[in-house]
Amino acid sequence: MKGSEDGTGPPPSGRAPAGIEGFEEISGGGIPRRRAPLITEVPIARLAGVERQFQASAQGSPDGAADPGSVIAILLREAREAVSTCEARYRRLVGRVSSLVFELATDGTVLFINEGAALIGCSPDALQGRNLWEAFSEAGGTAAADNLRRRLAAGDVRDYPLVLARGPDTQVFLELTTANRYSNDGQLERIIGFGLDATERARPEGQLRLQGAALNAAANAMLITDREGSILWCNPAFTQLTGYSRAEVAGANPRFLRSGKQDAAFYRGLWETIKSGQVWRGELTNRRKDGSLYPEEMTITPVRGEEGITHFIAVKQDVSARRQQEAARDRLVAIVSAVPHLVATMDARGRFLFLNPAGQRLLEITEDAITEAVLPDVYSTGVRRMITSEALPTAIREGMWSGETTILSRSGREISVQQVILAHRGADGDVEFLSTLAEDIRGRKRLEEEVRHLQKMEAIGRLAGGVAHDFNNFLMPILTYSELLLSKLDSEDPRHHYAQQMARVAERATALPRQLLAFSRRQILEPRVLRLSAIIADMGKMLRRLVGEDIAVEVGCDAELDYVRADVGQIEQVIMNLVVNARDAMPTGGTLAIQAVNVDINGTHTPLRQGITPGHYVRLSVSDTGCGMDGETLSHIFEPFFTTKEAGRGTGLGLSTVYGIVRQSGGAVYADSEPGRGATFTIYLPSLDPAELTCSTVPRTEGTPGGTEHIL
């Protein structure tokens, strides 16, 4: 090997430089059969005495002969220094880049990372020597970091999205690109990566993706049209609602949905509204692809651009289910509103939420004051304690309470009701609301009382009938022997006077059993077809004299009053007894009203009273404006020998006689009164079917026909 100026020759001293043994091996034929190159580093002394580091490479010749000329010497130290200088310059440059640049070992350990580490909330020193994948996971990108690691094992990665958290409210969007470095034998040695901060770009893109996903996932149907109405886009809910695919509606005008239920004026108004830039809201009926109709609620919003309105956005909601629910609710409300009993709903505290019309009338509460009322407030003090301490807790605990209570109206009127209180629970088991149904049982109680009264009167009637027969049996011998004595004794005989007095008293006494028999309905009647209006008219003058000048008599009868079958004399007795009773109740004067009208009692519009079956009746009522009676007096008013008059002024048989005659005639009689409000006696006699009437049964109408008149 020849020396040269660059110091590649032997040193001046002629000594072999260090490492020359390698050259001797190469030049001395030490590698004649080597297939792989021999590489070694040797220091070579320059002519100036300066050693330089070289790398020597030798390759054996194919024929096995040594070829010293095949030795290549490479200047190594300067190359290393150049690389080191270049690397330092590269690191200074990369260190100033805001993007993330890193070099990793194969296990993810950070060998180098620049100031871009701040993107994930760390400093370069904090990450040096750490595992970058773990740092990514700690920043909230666990799943993405694991996926990235798997991708890297398969090769380079380009623009891989990674979302990391930098603080509690800040997210960083990175796009990572990596390049793998491999050794000569193909083993992965290094991973070099570059992370671009895409936060500003990814945020609006993410919002657009999110908005698009929301529109596609929306339950309401949506479509976008141009300003002329041609469909540009629709979401899946629209295709599900209408049955049309996106391809079928693209570019079409939505008029293909029209059902014909709305006229041209409707659509003209719609277009005028949205063309003027206003939002249109309304309901209409449209037609699906299969021809079925459906109601929808639609909102159309104009979209403005620089040149004015550019698009329209329509949001549609199928309201079929809501319509059905509303219809079901309306039907339920209609049914509840028609119920003649109180029906109400309350919240868990007892405050009214709903009260049907019957309940409003019963409690005397107006509709606008319903929500101000509370259930316990509709009871008297004693009942309220029972409701709050027993009824409501039982309903909440067991689901239902029922019982008989007394409620109070706003005016303080007590009303007996049969009440049920129910507790309704939600899915969580808590009570959501209460409901109650209260039936006014005053009528039922009155009927029950009337039944008891009828049963009592029947018993008294049987007793009175027996007494009358026994009394007659005792009286008949007295009358017989009195008449016998009178026939035997001379009129001048003093005993004749005694017998005459005995006969007169006995004759008067015969009226008592007749009245008792009338009450017990055992007297003999002679019924015939008659009109009450004719009888009342015939008795007019007599009644006027009977009541006196201080009492005004008012008579009102239907012009075509139905016929009834009764004993004329007994009906006259009934009217007379009732008029006398009314007169005695008005000692200082007043008004006596006598009315006879036709009524049709069916139990629906006209309530049934005990003892009356549905049918056609003539109703005779006698009313006064006298002192009235309390409930206790009313309960005994028709009993024989019961009287409220002072001793010597009445026998107590007048009203019992009325009762017996009316009942024996197939009718019913009732008394209604309150203290200070007078009294009304009402008689119902069955009217005759026109088919039962013949010329022979209908009496001629002579005299004054019945009508509405005043007897002064």
Image: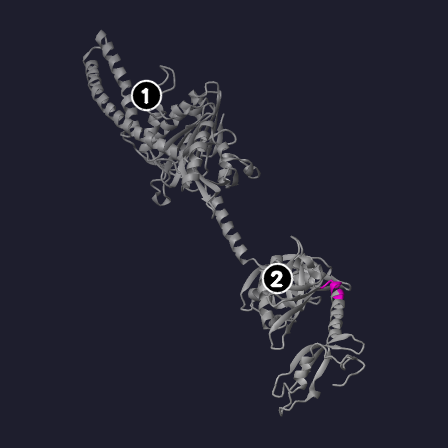
Relative depth, front residue between 145 and 429: 145
> What residue sits 29% from the left and 21% below the top?
512
The part of the image, by quadrant, that contains residue 99 is bottom right
Q: Can see residue 268?
A: no
Q: Can see residue 678?
A: yes
- The image position of residue 273, as x and y in percent, is 70, 59
Relative depth, front residue between 310 and 135: 135
Amino acid type shown at disc 1: Phe
Task: Examine the rendered structure and indicate whether residue 450 appears above or below residue 696.
Answer: above
The numbered disc on residue 665 is: none
Amino acid type shown at disc 2: Asn
> What residue sits 33% from the left and 23% below the top?
653
Badge 1 marks a residue whose secondary structure is: loop
- The image position of residue 680, as x and y in percent, is 43, 28
Task: Examine the rendered structure and indicate whether residue 431 appears above or below residue 482.
Answer: below
Relative depth, front residue between 553 and 521: 521
Which residue has dot 2 on it? 131
Label 1 vs label 2, nearer the camera: 2
The part of the image, by quadrant, that contains residue 98 is bottom right
- The image position of residue 637, as x and y in percent, is 37, 25
Tag 1–tag 2 contact (CB < 8 Å): no
Q: Which residues are magenta?
A: 92-99
Give the CA distance from mark 1 to mark 2.
Answer: 117 Å
- The local crowd at label 2, few if under 14, some if 14 to 19, many if 20 or more residues have their Cα within 10 Å, is some
Task: Examine the rendered structure and indicate whether residue 386 appears above or below residue 260.
Answer: above
Indicate whether residue 611 is drawn in magenta.
Answer: no
Quadrant of the snapshot with the N terminus: bottom right
Q: Is residue 710 left or right of residue 103?
A: left
The numbered disc on residue 641 is: 1
Of labels 1 and 2, earlier in sequence is 2
Task: Examine the rendered structure and indicate whether residue 34 appears above or below residue 289.
Answer: below
